Amino acid sequence: MLVILGVRYTRKISFLMSTAGKDYNSISPSAEYLVRLKALTRIPFAREAATLLISSMAPAAASADAPERKGLFKRLLHFENRYWTADNLLRQTHPQRILEISSGYSFRGLGWCFEQGVHFIDTDLPDLVAAKRPLIQPLIAGHPGTMQGRFELLPLNVMDTESFDAIINRFEEGPVSIVNEGLLVYLGDEEKRQLCDTIRQVLLRRGGYWITGDIYIKHKQKEVTSGHPVWDAFRKQHKLEENMFDDYAAAQALFESCGLEVVKREGLAINKLSCLDWPGVNKKDVIQLLERKPPVRESWCLQVK
């Protein structure tokens, strides 16, 4: 079953702004960058969505020069690993009701609903949902098999508690698993605490888990660049480095102060990384480096203390 709801929205709608006047729509351009990148992986629906969404695909590995190829591979490795570590933790909760917040152009929900009979609600800001909505039917039509679950695509600003609760109430009774990637790095400490409180209240009422792929640790260097000028400018604009946690202990302390505890952690999903099969990539050497190097990001599964 597929449900896609939508009405007209503008960027001036009040709930798109925090009390500090923050425009969360400015985050959305990163979604197109990521779908270009993920098109080079085996993440469900990523290539198909990129083909529908944009006229030119992500730069082909074969046509990139050595420095560009190296930078592209590092970004690809990072984001594919983030996707699969969060997905692995989500599977371990054995969910029947799943809410994905700030999903961007991820189509995790469609993949899950073709695979099993879950109720999956996919959400993001109204403007992005409006852009994403026309892709759903073509993706379904082009996918073999029959959808087993119920998929909904709905607009949501996660800082709006009332709207958040209204979407949760669309689920039947029972535990809810909430999942996200690429959200907490856009939120300051006060916003993180507000979101933690919203999710904690949901889990108190319903039971369930919160899986976040956003446990990022600040880098030791004074300035970190990706080698991609547009992405680096975006990172500076949104203060991504400043919004990361000082260390994993600081991340755990914040969640615990908000009444949440860490159940499971996952930093690597090596067996899922399709980018390791790129031509010219020494898979063994990359895996050894990943396992030896301390991770600067993890996915965590949280529940109410």
Image (tube, helix red, strand yellow):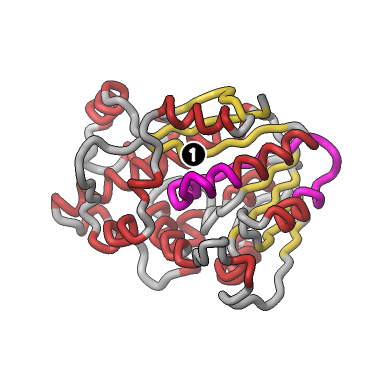
Q: How many labels were placed on the picture?
A: 1
- State the residue at coordinates (56%, 61%): 18
Q: Position of residue 56 (x, y in %)?
A: 36, 69
- State the residue at coordinates (68%, 37%): 200
Three-letter amino acid code of the residue under disc 1? Gly
Residue 190 to residue 59: above or below = above
- Residue occupying the far left of the picture: 66
Tell me the quadrant of the picture where the N terminus can be found. Answer: bottom right
Residue 177 magenta-highlighted: yes
**Mark 1 surroundings within 10 Å by alpha-carbon count, few (fewer than 14), some (14 through 19), many (20 or more):** many
Residue 46 to residue 301: above or below = below
- State the residue at coordinates (48%, 50%): 187
Which quadrant of the view contains residue 112? top right
Residue located beneath label 1 in the image: 213
Magenta segment boundaries in residue numbering: 168-194
Q: Position of residue 89 (x, y in %)?
A: 56, 30
Horizontal side, residue 211 vs residue 43: left or right: right
